[in-house]
Amino acid sequence: MDRIGTAGGQGYHPVASSQGKAHHEDPCRESDRIELSGERCARVEADEALLEKAIARLPKVDIHRHLDGAIRPQTILRVAGKYGIPLPAHTAETLKPYVCVTDKDKTLTDFLKKFDIISQLFVTPEAVKDISRQCVLDAKEENIKAMELRFSPEIMAAPAGLDLREVMDAVIEGVREGEKETGIVVSLTSVIPRHGGVINAKMMEDLTEEYVKKGALQWEKESSGGLSAPSGFGKFTSLDLACDESKFPADPYAPVFAESAQEGIHRTLHAGEARGAESVRVALHECQAERIGHGVRVFEDPELTREIVEKGIPLEMCPTSNVQTGAVSSLAGHPLKKFYDMGGKATINTDDPAVCDTDLNKEYLKAIKDMGCSLRDVENMIVYAIDAMFLPPALKGILHREIVKEINLVNSRL
């Protein structure tokens, strides 16, 4: 069968097993199938040490990771020390309660307060570059092969009064340095803050369009000799709408995203996290979203859920974050497995790994131990994620083949 999982492509329907329960076809070509028998899968899952070892070895993809939410306490200490930024604590462990979610934090307000200190770090373009590079280096420890980093240039630039282009250029430079050191492929997403208003959103769309088109021309030159292996990317590809979904619906921003669609800018919107299924409907129908950030409340509308499955719209689910922000009540009640079993393109991501005190190794383990997924389910979700990335098709094709090959290699050694 043809490879599936490309953002915006047609979905597929689950196939009924002999027990009448839906199961998944492999999200790749016949010659590229993920090889993991049910018997071997069950044996690995029954041995937690072996399961953790297998997960650590898996190649990983994160398509919903916020740059400012991925800054570890160690990095905060280092950058703050370099630039004389005052902190309430002076070791990574004592700083954690101020910048990471703890058991005492119960609300979205508690979650967002963790960014008060983080926002002070972007004092110069050099600091932004340093932080961006470090976020890529940190991802290497999770065995991440490809990821998308998203951030709001406006929010990052505001505390120190930086120029938006200074911020965007510094992120690109830092990410490219990180790519060279790690081999990770990274694409970048500009975030429009919902509370900023349509005029600011239009300005951000115009600026993102400029960077996306400039990056596309650069990529055309860089890849003109043909691609045999991924060698980094480090360019802007897409636009997001984020921040307080409960108070600021997406409807007013529909013309901004309509223009971005016309200009070839990819679109992923936060929706169905702090608002209900109607927010997802607006993101999909009015803002022309190709992917949905979170989307956990889409199940309030069964018809819309079926549409998303049939159209192959990926959901960028972030289990730990979804519990911490109150979008879902518990990991056991998270709809990741439900969406996957419907034939939906479910993906597992970190959202804000440093703030949430998580990483993809932990998220994959939770999906299996707490959310009803099998190891093979998680492996399929990795393939869904790489196929959903906003990357040039040739590069994405190479990454797909390499990731499937590496997953099969991990499985063959279990």
Image (cartoon, rainbow, N blue to C red):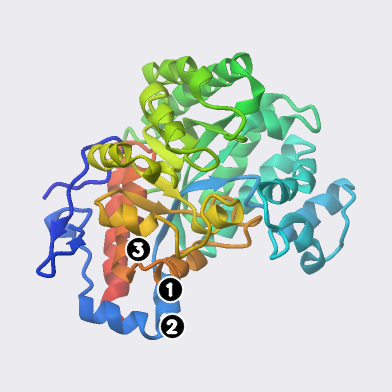
Checking the image for residue 378, the label placed there is 3
Residue 300 located left or right of residue 341: right
Front: mark 1 or 2: 1
Looking at the picture, does residue 209 appear above or below residue 159?
A: above
* Callouts 1 and 2 close, C-beta under 8 Å: yes
Q: Amino acid at mark 3?
A: Val
Callouts 3 and 1 close, C-beta under 8 Å? no
Residue count near mark 2 (Cα–Cα under 10 Å), binned few <14, some 14–19, many ≥20:
few
Residue identified by numbered label 1: 369
The x, y position of residue 154, in whole percent, is 67, 28
Residue drawn at x 82%, y 66% is 94
Which residue is rendered at x = 64% and y = 30% of the image? Answer: 153
Give the quadrant of residue 174: top right
Q: How many marks?
A: 3
The local secondary structure at tag 3 comes to helix
Residue highlighted by disc 2: 48
Q: Give the percent coordinates (x, y) of residue 321.
A: 56, 54
Residue 61, how many percent across, how many down? 42, 54
- Mark 2 element type: helix
Q: CA distance from mark 3 to mark 2?
A: 15 Å
